[in-house]
Image (spheres, rainbow, N blue to C red):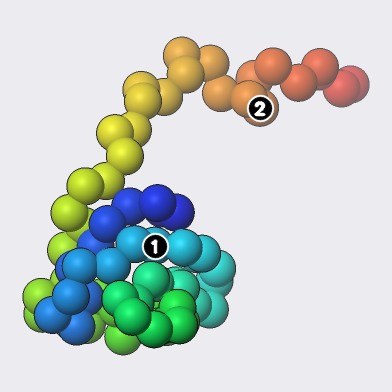
Amino acid sequence: MVGERVRFDGQVRVVLVVSGHAVTLSQLGGRPRSVPPALLFADDEFEIIDGAERGPLPAVSLVETLPHRC
């Protein structure tokens, strides 16, 4: 998730952008680095350092709030 700190390639980085094809990470002293998710998760040292806490799921799904059609 954007804003989370992760450990990748031996460094702590901040997630700047997430898309289906790449995760863009901050890089100390350099330009941001885009990494394919497969490469990110293949790194043995990869870890999410301080992820955002997820709230509970709502009691009612959004689909159930739509009007019924006959």
Which residue sits furthest front? 29
Indicate the position of residue 66 as horizontal and vertical percent values. 76, 21
Whether residue 38 is visible = no
Against 62, residue 48 (above or below) is below
Against 17, residue 10 (above or below) is below
Q: Could you tell me which residue is drawn at 20 percent across and 67 percent down?
A: 12
Q: Which residue is mark 1?
A: 15
Query: Tag 2: residue type?
Result: Val
In which image quadrant can residue 19 be found?
A: bottom right
Give whichever of 2, 65 is nearer the camera: 2
Q: Secondary structure at mark 2?
A: helix
Which residue sits furthest right? 70
Q: Earlier in the sequence, mark 1 or mark 2?
A: 1
Q: Going by the image, does 24 lie left or right of 67? A: left
Res 44 label = none
The answer to the question of whether label 1 and label 2 lie on touching residues, with beta carbons closer than 8 A, is no
In which image quadrant can residue 14 be found?
A: bottom left
Q: Which residue is mark 2?
A: 63
Q: Could you tell me which residue is drawn at 24 percent across and 62 percent down?
A: 6
Circle 2 Cα neighbour tier, 10 Å, few/some/many (<14 / 14–19 / ≥20): few
Q: Going by the image, does 65 lie left or right of 45? A: right
Whether residue 49 is visible = yes
Q: Could you tell me which residue is drawn at 89 percent across and 21 percent down?
A: 70
Q: Could you tell me which residue is drawn at 40 percent across and 51 percent down?
A: 3
Query: Tag 1: residue type?
Result: Val
Against 53, residue 19 (above or below) is below
